[in-house]
Image (cartoon, rainbow, N blue to C red):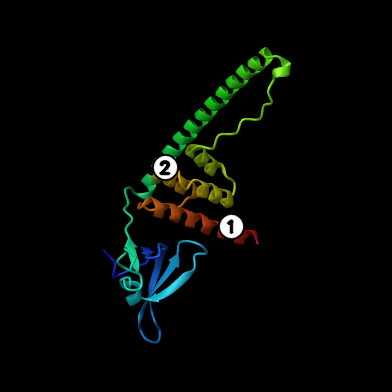
Amino acid sequence: MPQGDPRAGEKYLHFKNKLYQVLTIAQHSETGEKMVIYQALYGTFETYARPLAMFVSPVDKEKYPQVKQKYRFQWVEFKKTAEPSEQKEIAKEETAERRETAKEEAAERRETAKEETAEQKETDQAEPAEQEPLRTEPAKPPLTAEEKLLAFFDADTIEEKYSILVDMRDDVTDRMINSMAVVMDVVVEEGPLDLRYEELKACLRTKQRYECSRLR
């Protein structure tokens, strides 16, 4: 485990539950001390520098007794289950299947709604006019996880995709993240679901920043 030897591209979790990625290991021009250059994978993606010895040091348990994490920056292992090309192919197939399933379910709901409307009209016509109750439009049911995923695919802008992803927080799965990563042409490595979700959000926010820069 490379806890004491961070390298470019590796991800580390700060004991305050913030995710960072190592960019490179530099050397101080005056003292020769090794420095870790790393970037936040949240917010405005700021870049920081910290002495290597401090970066790999344990958490100060006297100052932070409630923290369970051993190191200040804990190395996060992302296991790859397949090559990126294989993941893309699998995700494309799953995305096509989900699109088809979502369309079929939507068609069934529309048909059911038509039948219920027709039955309601017959009931209304059979009742005396003076006894006809006031009717309000039925509330639309919330979107399912698959419908949200389909909306993500069809969104025209990065901002729309980001908003949909935020709304999917409680429904997202590893397969959904793989599919969305394929659509965005990015690779989200395997690992804990929460970290993969935050990494995909970070990728979307980065693309959003570049998109805004091009429009200026």
Q: Residue at x 50, y 28 (%)?
A: 104
Structural crowding at the residue carrying mark 2, measured as other residues with C-alpha within 10 Å and reported as few (<14), some (14–19) or many (≥20): many
Position of 51 relative to 215 (above/below): below
Q: Which quarter of the image is occupied by the C terminus?
A: bottom right
Residue 2: image location, x then y, percent: 28, 66
Instruction: Name the residue nearer the viewer: 91 or 64.
Output: 64
The residue that mark 1 highlights is 211
Q: Residue at x 56, y 60 (%)?
A: 209
The three-letter amino acid code for the residue at tag 2 is: Ala
* View extreme (bottom): residue: 30
Report the Cα–Cα distance between label 1 and label 2: 25 Å
Position of 135 relative to 2 (above/below): above
Residue 76: image location, x then y, percent: 33, 60
Position of 144 relative to 200 (above/below): above
Q: Cβ–Cβ below 8 Å for labels 1 and 2?
A: no
Q: Which quarter of the image is occupied by the N terminus?
A: bottom left
